[in-house]
Image (tube, rainbow, N blue to C red):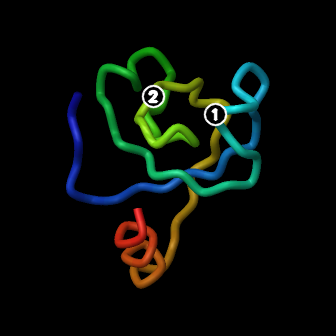
Amino acid sequence: MTHSSEHRFVICIRTDDYPASLEKRKIYEDLRDADAEKHHQLRVIDESGEDYLYPKEYFVPVKLPKATEQVLVNVA
């Protein structure tokens, strides 16, 4: 798994096969995984507190102000 020091965030827009693991309209950190991206997936820390792969189309990228990003990273 490859992680970048830059934080990227996504908003969940679908939970089709994962209603217990993901919440619609919730912000998740994209843990940037090059192998997952090759398979059109994203690695995020889900509701279990663990990181898992999900279909990329379940999320949309969001650009947040740096101060907001830092708050989200600190509370994780």
Q: Quadrant of the N terminus?
A: top left
Q: CA distance from mark 2 to mark 1?
A: 9 Å
Q: Residue, x 45% and y 52% (percent of image)?
A: 29
CB within 8 Å, label 2 to label 1: yes
Please indicate whether residue 13 sits to the left or right of residue 67 in the image. right
Residue 22, x across and y down, in percent: 66, 38
Secondary structure beneath disc 1? Answer: loop
Please indicate whether residue 68 sits to the left or right of residue 60 in the image. left
Is residue 45 shown above or below 21? below
Name the amino acid, label 2. Tyr
Please indicate whether residue 1 sits to the left or right of residue 49 in the image. left
- Give the mark nearer the N terminus: 2 vs 1: 1
Name the amino acid, label 1. Ser
Residue 43, x across and y down, in percent: 43, 33
Using the rendered view, name the quadrant where residue 73 is placed. bottom left
Secondary structure beneath disc 2? Answer: strand
Is residue 13 shown above or below 51? below
Residue 42, x across and y down, in percent: 47, 32
The residue closer to the viewer here, 31 or 64, is 31
Q: Residue, x 37% and y 76% (percent of image)?
A: 70
Residue that extends furthest to the top in the rendered view of this protein: 39
Q: Which mark is residue 69?
A: none
Task: Tell me how many marks there are.
Answer: 2
Dot 1 crowding, Cα within 10 Å, few <14, some 14–19, many 20+: some
Q: Residue, x 45% and y 15% (percent of image)?
A: 39
Residue 76, x across and y down, in percent: 40, 62
Is residue 30 shown above or below 57? below
The residue tagged 1 is 21
The residue tagged 2 is 52
